[in-house]
Image (cartoon, helix red, strand yellow):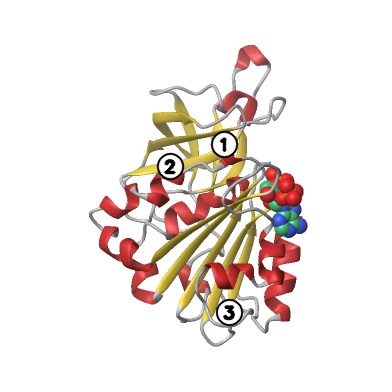
Amino acid sequence: MKDAPYFVEKVLWVKHWTDRLFSFAITRPASFRFRSGEFVMIGLPPREELGGKKPILRAYSIGSPSFAEELEFFSIKVPDGPLTSRLQQIQEGDEILLGKKPTGTLVLDAVRPGKRLFLFGTGTGLAPWLSVARDPDAYSRFERVIVAHGVREVKELAYRDLFTHEIFDDPLVGDEARAQLTYYPTVTREPFERQGRFTDLIESGKLFSDLGLEGDKFDPEHDRAMLCGSMAMIKDTAALLEAHGLKEGSNAEPGDFVIERAFVG
Ligand code: A2P
């Protein structure tokens, strides 16, 4: 008999950040392996009373590091979205379908060695950095890890507590994070301690001065980056990285930066 294409897992917890954003975690099957930063298909079993026969699955970045016991996800709620309109109602104990083939390019193996790792995420594009920045490998490969989160409104800065203090108590990466991690939030549509799109912060040089870096450009010898967000954000930010001399990489050919669109949006 052919193996089912997905695992059936259980919801462990759900956390609602805003009326548009929530996170949840599910059990991890013993045989499920992935690299920090990868994505996987997630879905709900079909509900026959809703006329459903086939499950609806969408790609989601895994927000847990590769060795975690549970699998965490950070999702948008789309009111009439085929999956997220139902997914946002899940509760502890509910069943979730989990694809068997995690994959993706936002992994440490796809970037060449360097000194600084910039993780740029807008909206739910923060999700892969929840994984990468909680993986000790990030800190052994880079002297400095910068988690940059760009959102429209302050309340969308989900995981602010994680990156401003909780991570420093993490038994595995707490000490490294304290010494090497910088959280860099920015808000575009209301007042905040830092405002503006990543692209503007890069072009004005403010990103570099804020981080205490010399010069006002990325350094192709030492700087590496990963991008996750809307198509427009990726396209515009990648163009700036390229203008500064950084080259895009992949799993097959590691480079100076890698990209992936934030999926459900
Ligand atoms: P803005 O408010 O100026 O559009 P979204 O929810 O649309 O994905 O946006 C999330 C964040 O990404 C917002 O702060 C938004 O800024 C920013 N953003 C949107 N498009 C781009 C882009 N092309 N380059 C850089 N940042 C962008």
Name the spot of residue 158 as percent of width and height, x first. Answer: 51, 41
Q: Amino acid at mark 3?
A: Gly
Q: Amino acid at mark 1?
A: Lys
Which residue occupies 32% across, 62% down? Answer: 178
Callout 1 environment at 10 Å: few (<14), some (14 to 19), or many (20+)?
Answer: few
Earlier-in-chain disc, 2 versus 1: 2
85 relative position to 28: left or right: right
Which residue occupies 41% across, 59% down? Answer: 133
**Mark 1 lies on residue:** 155
For discs 2 and 1, the disc positioned in front in the rendered view: 1
Callout 2 environment at 10 Å: few (<14), some (14 to 19), or many (20+)?
Answer: many
**Mark 2 lies on residue:** 72
Which residue occupies 63% across, 50% down? Answer: 262
Callout 3 environment at 10 Å: few (<14), some (14 to 19), or many (20+)?
Answer: some
> Residue reaching furthest left?
171
Which residue occupies 25% across, 58% down? Answer: 172
Name the spot of residue 115 as percent of width and height, x first. Answer: 45, 80
**Mark 3 lies on residue:** 255
